Image (cartoon, rainbow, N blue to C red):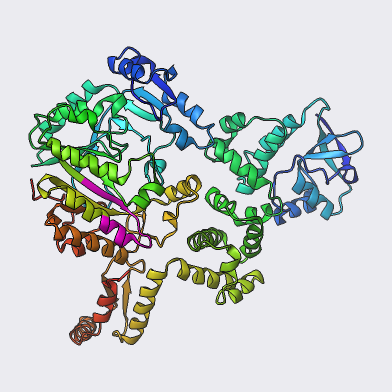
Amino acid sequence: MELRQISLREINLEDTRFKFTLDKSDEKLSFSIQRAGLVEPVIVKSDGQAFILVTGWRRVEASRKFGLKEIMGLVTPSELTDLTLFSLAFFESYPKKNFSLAEKALIIKKFIEFGLSREEIIKEFLARLELPPERQTVDLLSQLACLDWALPSIHRGGWKLSTARLFLTFLPEEREAIIGLSEAFNHNQQAELIELLFTLKKRRKVGLDTILTEEELKPLVRAARERKPRAGLELLAALRERAFPLVTEINREIQAALRQINLPVNSRLDYDHSLEKSSLSISFEARTREEMELVVEQLKQKLKEGELDVLFGLLNKEIDE
Amino acid sequence: MQENKWIKRIFVNRQLENSPLVERIISRLKPTPVKLVDRLEEIQAELRLATDPIAESKRVLFLTDEKAFIRPCPCSPGAVPCGYWTIDLNLNCPLDCSYCILQAYFSLQPLTIAVNQKDLESELGAFLASTRTKVLRIGTGELGDSLALEAISGQASFLIDLFRDKKGVLLELKTKTAAIDSLLVSPPSENVVLAWSLNTERIIKMEEIGSASLGERVRSAERAVEHGFKVAFHFDPIIYYSGWEKEYGEVCEGLLKKIPPASLAWVSLGTLRFPGKLREIARQRFPESLIYEEELVRSWDGKLRYPRPLRLRIYQKLGEIFKAYGCSDRLYLCMESPEVWMDFSKQNKKGEAFSFPFF
């Protein structure tokens, strides 16, 4: 490879055939280039008229931002195939970067486009990308990589394979709706959102639109799309209520009953919100024996008066259906 | 030669090429192609390339040896155990039930038959000599159906003969098939229990691909009883759906009208439960199945289950039917919490193996 100064204007950034990273230029890189210039040369391929970037997208972006005219670049020999060059790009990043699922999807798709067989990808790359080394992984990620409009969100959302798998079961317009909502949620919440929407859609045998335009959900969906504070949390809570009606209903009754109970000061009543356990726990703080005796006495009195009976009844509630 | 409904290829551990059982199985499956391999990984490398590796693993037979066979049934941590032991002579199952835990438990495991039966004989001898339990229950249905490959392997017949004279131990062969003909050739054994997993016809049709119908299973159980075997039933997993109460009730009633209590060894009840990983796999493999979309909560052992009040309701409803037929003492709950056990049976058996009062 030939090391030489390359004019940034000579690089054709519209040719993204070797690009699979989705990170934007960050503060650290900007600061580094601002202070020391571009230390590590990019790798380019010449197509006779311009250079095609093989590695260094973020570096070029940051260099342009700081008004550099030229940067150091390694020009690859013309006999190297695109597959070899893409492998070069991949292996340059592989030891340094934890690829997101969206990036892994792009890597797999591009390897296939450059002529690597699915068998080779399964054998050589999937385990190293921390993915199940099976054909269906290749198929799923190839499908995901085709949704280039959604990849930046999937990348930012830090999706796992299981979330992507569910996402791909939605119709195209439903996928757009989900991506439109996703920015209101953090990583784990995005996974939960998709899980809940999948469950409700399948359970009710309706389209996603029917769920999201439900009277009570509509304003929450709108607020989430507008990324209003807490909108995501409120929408998730509303969806959970719909996905877990029995547990929600009993918890609601317990919470209502708890509000009627005046526990001694410094004491706290708790229970298993999943309702797996039917027991109550009461904890309290006391600095002296007298304080403790007082709390115990008050609790005994409440038990005697049957004030907690309603809670035991709800935690042992028998259902009709 | 037996009818071969499932197996498309046979792999043989090269070291066991000349085993009489290997030869017998291959001849029963002729003309299925046979390939010698040195390692399981060679088969797995092929399974990886399948569009559905789990389905493919059910069509590939591996004849090999196993190092050990007997182990305690891996009950959920925190659940009330029933003291069951398993014999893992076969791994994986040709049936394809949407709820089957083996989908998540195994990774690229072909249908596997262990052909080193002699090793099991010696392991069993040592195991029984060291076990102090009064009545020991042991079975093969944990990592595969006990009878689905019987026509090919003859493993169940071998086990019945092996256990015939063993005192204080009950061998259970558990199946969703009706493949008991070969077991009715020899005299019954007092300590062998033939067992069927039962479900409603709706669930069998939708979720238990390749299994026998409800009618075929019950009829097989009747034949086993007529022959002199004791029988057992496992309502597991019980699936909640609109109409469950009526349909499960009909299955229980229909069964109890046909099977005399004296022949009924035990009946287990267990509602649907699974680790999250299984749902991920099954949603992909069985997109039409709705069983994973009901209200399921993460429970004490990390598995997803129906909420406790619903599970209890299900157990109590079915329990009432068995009670009406005088068989409630045969019931036990599989992988349930002490809380649910306590409410179901009004006895807290935490930390103890479930004792079977009828033996």
Please state the horizontal and vertical placement of residue B242, each as a whole percent of the image.
38, 63
- Residue at 27%, 21% (x, y): give it: B116
Q: Quadrant of the C terminus of chain B?
A: top left
Please state the horizontal and vertical placement of residue B123, each as a whole percent of the image.
19, 27
Vertical order, A226 against B2 (above or below) = below
Please state the horizontal and vertical placement of residue A256, each as a whole percent of the image.
37, 82
- Residue at 39%, 60% (x, y): give it: B296
| Residue B112 visible from this viewpoint | yes
- Residue nearest the viewer, comparing B224 with B37: B224
Is residue B133 on the magenta stretch? no
| Residue A93 visible from this viewpoint | no
Q: Determine which quarter of the picture holds residue A10.
A: top right
- Residue nearest the viewer, comparing A7 with A304: A304
Q: Quadrant of the N terminus of chain B?
A: top left
Vertical order, A264 against B165 (above or below) = below
Relative side of A126 to B20, left or right = right
- Residue at 17%, 42% (x, y): give it: B231
Q: Determine which quarter of the picture holds residue A54.
A: top right
Vertical order, A237 against B352 (above or below) = below
Extent of the magenta region: B233-250
- Residue nearest the viewer, comparing A82 with B280: B280
Residue extending farthest right: A49
Please state the horizontal and vertical placement of residue A248, each as a whole percent of the image.
40, 72
Relative side of A129 to B330, left or right = right
